[in-house]
């Protein structure tokens, strides 16, 4: 098969270090990827570019798929988050984050295997705020039929494609009857077209309680923007934190797969960062390309990588954050040895 061009945004801090490790593992798996590197975040600013350069956006539009390391957004300097800009510019309306227990990563829970699907473009994150009168400010929650419909469709299509059995909507429609009411109404309408997928609605405060009681009772969680942001990090904590979960932002035309943890500048260049989250996101990317472009070779490579890092974790070949002693590149080598 021919090489598939994919945009790589190494990012800042530990980003370049973990990107090198992931590229080595992908090459060892046999995946035919031609990486097109582009800048974003502080690394772009340091070269006199915008925090998200036009050249980076144009490359993603051209090649449709990107893998992104963590990018630093300067605090208090008026720069918009790279992630927010990517979502808005490319209309990446669906944040998809699988959450599952990994062998060798001990947590309070076992058997967790769920997927967060979050609407990425509106809600309270629309940024519609104003001062009503001195000392009184207001933030408006935005919901549209189009956005509610398409994220619900994404959830049910994902469930069917991945063999998932249930979609649960977390909401607060008992209080926000118009905005959250629209969200669950569109979700319920879609559910009637997917009789093979169980559908349920749970008020979010009760849902959070149920999550910490027994997260294994959930399969796919469908949430509006703010709820999805909070719950995706909470659920990551159920399985070991942001360092052991992948992330993606998907639209109808482009998709960006990313490590959702920070750039950790304090350990940059020290060869101690864990590349697992970026690697898992890369596996998601390979499966996405297999699904959307018929690249069965990529699915085979994704399975090889996943089996190898699972085996490394089971064997205790891990980085320091997971209780091991391996450096970034040594962990990559341990994975490659198990492929």
Image (cartoon, grey):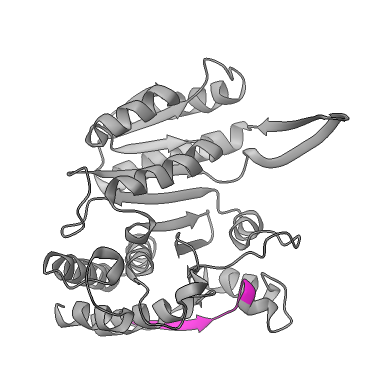
Residue 298 location (% of width, % of height): 29, 71
Q: Is residue 157 magenta?
A: no
Residue 32 location (% of width, % of height): 34, 82
Image quadrant in which the C terminus is located:
bottom left
19 and 319: which is toward the camera: 319
Residue 40: quadrant of the picture: bottom right
At 59% from the left and 75% from the top, the residue drawn is: 59
Placement of 60 over or under 103, stated as above or below = below
At 60% from the left and 31% from the top, the residue drawn is: 145
Q: Which residue lies most toward the left here? A: 315
Residue 307 location (% of width, % of height): 17, 67
331 and 88: which is toward the camera: 331
Q: Which residues are magenta?
A: 32-42
Residue 165 location (% of width, % of height): 25, 36
Q: Is residue 40 magenta?
A: yes
Q: Is residue 203 visible?
A: no
Image quadrant in which the N terminus is located:
bottom left
At 35% from the left and 72% from the top, the residue drawn is: 275
Placement of 5 over or under 239, stated as above or below = below
At 48% from the left and 41% from the top, the residue drawn is: 230
Q: Is residue 127 left or right of residue 190?
A: right
């Amino acid at each position: 098969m021919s090489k598939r061009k994919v945009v790589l945004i190494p990012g800042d801090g530990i980003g370049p270090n973990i990107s090198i490790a992931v590229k080595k593992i992908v090459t060892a798996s046999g995946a035919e990827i031609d990486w097109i590197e582009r800048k974003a975040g502080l690394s772009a600013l340091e070269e006199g570019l915008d925090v998200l350069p036009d050249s980076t956006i144009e490359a993603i539009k051209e090649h449709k798929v990107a893998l992104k390391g963590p990018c630093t957004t300067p605090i208090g300097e008026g720069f918009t988050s790279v992630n927010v800009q990517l979502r808005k510019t490319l209309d990446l309306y669906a944040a998809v984050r699988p959450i599952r227990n990994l062998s060798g990563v001990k947590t309070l829970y076992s058997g967790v295997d769920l997927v967060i699907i979050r609407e990425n473009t509106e809600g309270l994150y629309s940024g519609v705020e104003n001062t009503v009168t001195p000392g009184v400010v207001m933030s408006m929650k935005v919901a549209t039929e189009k956005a509610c419909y398409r994220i619900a469709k994404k959830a049910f299509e994902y469930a069917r494609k991945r063999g998932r059995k249930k979609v649960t909507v977390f909401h607060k429609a008992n209080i926000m009857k118009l905005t959250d009411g629209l969200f669950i109404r569109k979700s319920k309408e879609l559910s009637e077209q997917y009789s093979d997928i169980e559908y349920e609605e749970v008020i979010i405060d009760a849902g959070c309680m149920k999550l910490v009681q027994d997260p294994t009772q959930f399969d796919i969680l469908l949430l509006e923007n703010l709820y999805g942001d909070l719950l995706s990090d909470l659920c990551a904590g159920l399985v070991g934190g942001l360092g052991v979960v992948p992330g993606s932002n998907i639209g109808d035309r482009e998709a960006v797969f990313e490590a959702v943890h920070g750039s950790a500048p304090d350990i940059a260049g020290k060869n101690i960062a864990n590349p697992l989250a970026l690697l898992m996101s890369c596996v998601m990317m390979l499966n996405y390309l297999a699904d959307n472009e018929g690249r069965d070779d990529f699915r085979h490579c994704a399975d090889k990588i996943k089996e190898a890092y699972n085996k490394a974790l089971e064997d205790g070949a891990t980085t320091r954050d997971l209780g091991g002693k391996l450096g970034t590149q040594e962990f990559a080598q341990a994975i490659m040895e198990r492929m």
